[in-house]
Image (cartoon, coloured by chain):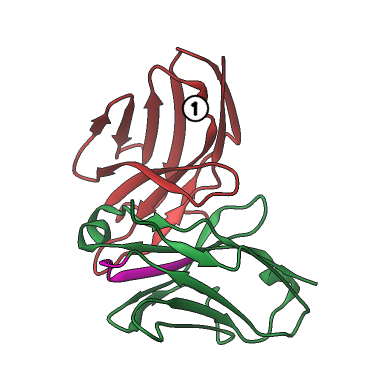
Chain colours: A green, B red
Amino acid sequence: EPEVTQTPSHQVTQMGQEVILRCVPISNHLYFYWYRQILGQKVEFLVSFYNNEISEKSEIFDDQFSVERPDGSNFTLKIRSTKLEDSAMYFCASSGLAGVVTGELFFGEGSRLTVL
Amino acid sequence: DQQVKQNSPSLSVQEGRISILNCDYTNSMFDYFLWYKKYPAEGPTFLISISSIKDKNEDGRFTVFLNKSAKHLSLHIVPSQPGDSAVYFCAAKGGPPMGQFYFGTGTSLTVIP
């Protein structure tokens, strides 16, 4: 069964360093998302992406965040200068057209980011 | 700003009994409501959804009820099985084009054999 894959599964970084989290969405999906979950808190929307541009973003997704689909298969989230409060589990998700209507997203297993 | 709330962080149910998970929301413009299930070390998995124009949707052992006047939805699992033990997230989706998804904080369900 097709699945969304994310790398790395866990990254530890020093505050102020740049981090890139990578995702390979399901191949025929066109809509891509990043969510995050700080330990013990709710899953929070960061950004949605379609047709090579950001469709919607939350207040969390400030200038230190960026997304890119560099090669038609990967979907990346870059955090330019990490802060302690960026420590969280970051989930990539993708959906087909039906999912945009019904909300059925396919999530990856997540990348745990720990900022020291 | 909690647009979707799950007030019960945990729930324990005997195997074979009904599990009822509850969720409240504040925004009447949401067009779809969803339940996701999450096991440890895995991403959320879509379980069931309901359109805002319906009040019930059933899929096997899972039924979601929507009460728009109360801005409340619930997930019923009957009968509950030990494999249902997981964290359940309620989510709501805004309207087109893509619609931002708002998740609740989750309810950890434990089904006791």
x then y, percent, for residue A112: 64, 62
**Does dot 1 land on a helix, a strand or a loop?**
helix
In the picture, measured across the screen, residue A17 lies left or right of residue B11, that is right
**Magenta stretch containing residue A31, yes or no?**
yes
Residue drawn where x is 30% and y is 67% of the image: A27
Query: Pointer 1: residues within 10 angstroms few (<14), some, or many (20+)?
Result: few
x then y, percent, for residue A86: 67, 71
Q: Chain of mark 1?
A: B
Q: Amino acid at mark 1?
A: Gly
x then y, percent, for residue B97: 24, 69
x then y, percent, for residue B29: 29, 56
**Stretch of the chain drawn in magenta:** A27-34
Q: Nearer the viewer, residue A104 or B100?
A: A104
Residue drawn where x is 47% and y is 52% of the image: B103
Residue that carries the numbered disc 1 in the rendered image? B83
Q: Nearer the viewer, residue A26 or B28?
A: A26
Q: Quadrant of residue A36?
A: bottom right
**Magenta stretch containing residue B78, yes or no?**
no
